[in-house]
Image: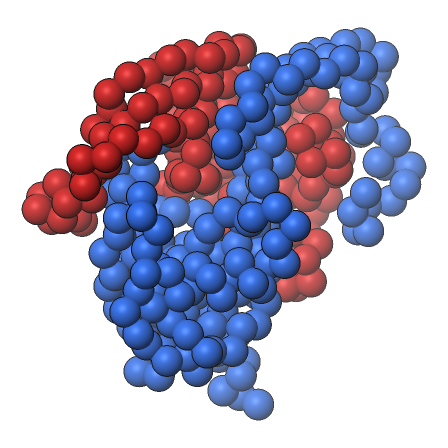
Chain colours: A red, B blue
Amino acid sequence: MGNNIEDSLYCELAEKKLNSSLIFEGSILKLYFDEVKLPNGKTATREKVSHPGAVAVVPVNKNNEVILVKQYRYPIEDVLIEIPAGKLDKNEPTHICAERELHEEAGAVDGKLDHLLTIYTSPGFSDEKMEIYIATGFKEKDNKPDHDEFLSIIKVSMKKCIDMISKGEITDAKTIIGILSAKEYLKKKKQK
Amino acid sequence: MGNNIEDSLYCELAEKKLNSSLIFEGSILKLYFDEVKLPNGKTATREKVSHPGAVAVVPVNKNNEVILVKQYRYPIEDVLIEIPAGKLDKNEPTHICAERELHEEAGAVDGKLDHLLTIYTSPGFSDEKMEIYIATGFKEKDNKPDHDEFLSIIKVSMKKCIDMISKGEITDAKTIIGILSAKEYLKKKKQK
């Protein structure tokens, strides 16, 4: 349990798993349909999507531009503007995944990674956990997308990124959080 | 398609649905296993979770405190600190859902709602779209959680909220985005 929640409150709020059925196991997702006991003793059902976990990185180059990728997202049938990101391979350390995605999607190599935040993208129905990094001081080479990955790179100043968020041109949750945190990180670093 | 993406780029990146199988239809989620044609003509599979959409609200009271809820999240087996939020009922306008959740979860009534942002929580595998609002000028009454909803309210200054985000005490994506946007919104409002 999170270290910011008192034990007694945790017990007042927690649900207990009674039954669990694995409905679907794909190459990425698992879907469970479970029965739980509520804090008041009643029962309820829960639909849960299990995800391998992911990493996202805000790559800020030497011109202080953020490298973003435009990518088609099948679930929403649209192209989104996002920071480079990817799912964790089994047992893969998150910083290794971050370096891989930086190279594949943004063509950024040999940089410095700093961890910004850990987030849950949609904890009401999914366990997806994401580690967000910032990358600086990297060399820019050609990107090397996976064979089934199609994307287009844009380089955008931090100011313009913030503007794109307020205008609704950037709508991806991890990208909004990554950019806003990276901005604060760079501001603090400059003040030192 | 998003109005920020050129037509030609959209065509270069888009995937075309070839087949779709509905694997699971629960009371909240639907899971599809689809086959798509990639931009290079090859085929691939896609696992997609369909979600009814949601609303989240940052309630800022007259003492400039944010009303947050601690709530057990079954998928991650932990209690999280979040802004009030809820799923849309069928055909429900988002501001009506926002007012309902504000009353049910935070006990906030008769306030003013302003739209902050629209986000996709996890567009790689889910179509969940969320409208984020800020509520101000409301009256504080007892909250009225649903019969199967258990939560505990805390009231936290904006400064402390930001601190909790950097310390990793707030990890829910919509809550981080809501708080950071609400901070900017209030700053701009003060400057006017």
- How many marks can you see? 0
- The relative height of residue A172 versus residue B61 in the rendered view (above or below) is above
**Looking at the image, which residue sits at the far bottom?**
B192
Q: Nearer the viewer, residue B1 or A167?
A: B1
Q: Nearer the viewer, residue B68 or A98?
A: B68
Give the image quarter of residue A45. Answer: top left
User: Where residue A50 sits: x, y (%)?
Assistant: 42, 22
**Looking at the image, which residue sits at the far right?**
B8
Q: Quadrant of the N terminus of chain B?
A: top right
Is residue A71 shown left or right of residue B59?
A: right
Give the image quarter of residue B159. Answer: bottom left
Judge whether residue A162 can be spotted in this image: no
Q: Quadrant of the C terminus of chain B?
A: bottom right
Q: Nearer the viewer, residue B55 or B103?
A: B103
User: Where residue B87 sits: x, y (%)?
Assistant: 50, 47
Judge whether residue B115 can be spotted in this image: yes
Is residue A128 shown left or right of residue A82?
A: left
- The relative height of residue B80 versus residue B112 in the rendered view (above or below) is above
The residue that appears at 76% across and 13% down in the rendered structure is B19
- The relative height of residue A150 versus residue A175 in the rendered view (above or below) is above
The residue that appears at 74% across and 38% down in the rendered structure is A79
Is residue B183 shown left or right of residue A4?
A: right
Q: Nearer the viewer, residue B48 or A168?
A: B48
**Looking at the image, which residue sits at the far left?**
A8
User: Where residue B153 sits: x, y (%)?
Assistant: 25, 61
Is residue A141 shown left or right of residue B174?
A: right
The residue that appears at 73% across and 44% down in the rendered structure is A154
- The relative height of residue A68 versus residue B99 in the rendered view (above or below) is above
User: Where residue B175 sits: x, y (%)?
Assistant: 41, 55
The residue that appears at 35% across and 22% down in the rendered structure is A34
